[in-house]
Each structure stands twice: as C-alpha cells, then as structure tokens.
Image (cartoon, grey):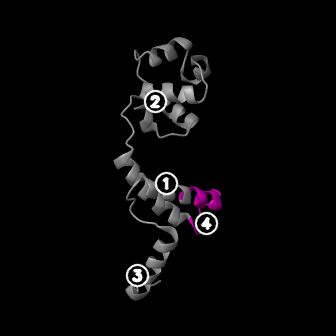
Amino acid sequence: MKTAIDINRLVPAWAKLREVADIGPIRNEAHYLRMSRTLESLLELAAGDETHPAMSLIDIMGELIEDYEARKHPLPKVSGVQALKFLMAQHGLRQSDLQDLGSQGVVSEILAGKRDLNIRQVRRLSDRFGVSPATFI
C-alpha cells in the first residue's frame, strides 16, 4: 500500500477528470443538475453493487450534492406527524392501512397530534417507508 501520493501525477489526473466529469463543489443550479444526472447514471451502472468500482465516486458526488441541497434547497422543518401524513399521501394510505401502529383510535389520536409515536411505532414506520427513524421524532 502506498503511503505517499505523487502530486505530480495527481494534479493532471484530477484536471482530466474535472474536464470530463465536472466533479467538484457545486457552484450553481446548472452544475447541480449536471452532477445529479451523472450521479443517477452512476447509480444505474452500479445497480446496487456495493463493491462496484464506481461506489467511491458515487459517495463523493452524493456528498457534494447533499451539501448543495442543504444550502440551496433546505427541507422545511416538519413534525413526525406531518411527515407521516405526507408519506401516507405519497403512498395512497388511509388510517386503516396503519393497523401495525395500533387500533384505529390510536392511529387517529397520533394523526390528530393527541398522542406521540412510541419507539416501536417509529421503528415500524421507518422500516415501512424506508426512511430514518429521525423523520418521526
């Protein structure tokens, strides 16, 4: 394993990569869109294979995009109940579809803001919708 980086080889290689892929801190919306399209193509190429050679590039680009989105497209702060209502609407769910949270009355109280979600319910919702448990806290 090499411990030192040959800067004389690194800089020209980086310049060539930037010329081909325009990878770097995102400067504006057009650059953001180019980076997002490139990331989508790389994700398609990797097809979920965590060992794919493109994964480290995917990680780097994902971080750059995430940084830009946090600065320029911040998500509004919402409560766990608001997030749940949004996800229900996105998935075409009704209260009766959330029986794993509790009885119809329990679900109604949660959605009305009269009852907090407990840890078990947060975990189930997180698993069901594939989002972080923090979404509902």
Q: Which quadrant does the C terminus fall into? A: top left
Q: CA distance from mark 1 to mark 2?
A: 26 Å
Do the CB atoms of the residues marked 3 and 1 lie less than 8 Å apart? no
> Which percent across, then down, holds residue 136?
43, 31
Point out the tag, 3 or 2, that comes first from the N-terminus. Answer: 3
Q: CA distance from mark 3 to mark 2?
A: 45 Å
Point out the tag, 4 or 3, that comes first from the N-terminus. Answer: 3
Point out the tag, 4 or 2, that comes first from the N-terminus. Answer: 4
Mark 4 vs mark 3: give the one in front. Answer: 3
Specify the amino acid type for callout 4: His
Do the CB atoms of the residues marked 3 and 2 lie less than 8 Å apart? no
Element carrying mark 4: loop
Element carrying mark 2: helix
Find residue 6 and report its image quarter: bottom left
Q: Is residue 42 visible?
A: yes
The one nearer the camera, 121 or 32, is 32
Element carrying mark 1: helix
Query: Which region is colored magenta?
Result: 39-54
Specify the amino acid type for callout 2: Ala
Specify the amino acid type for callout 3: Val
Point out the tag, 3 or 1, that comes first from the N-terminus. Answer: 3
- Please say whether residue 70 is one of the residues in the magenta stretch: no
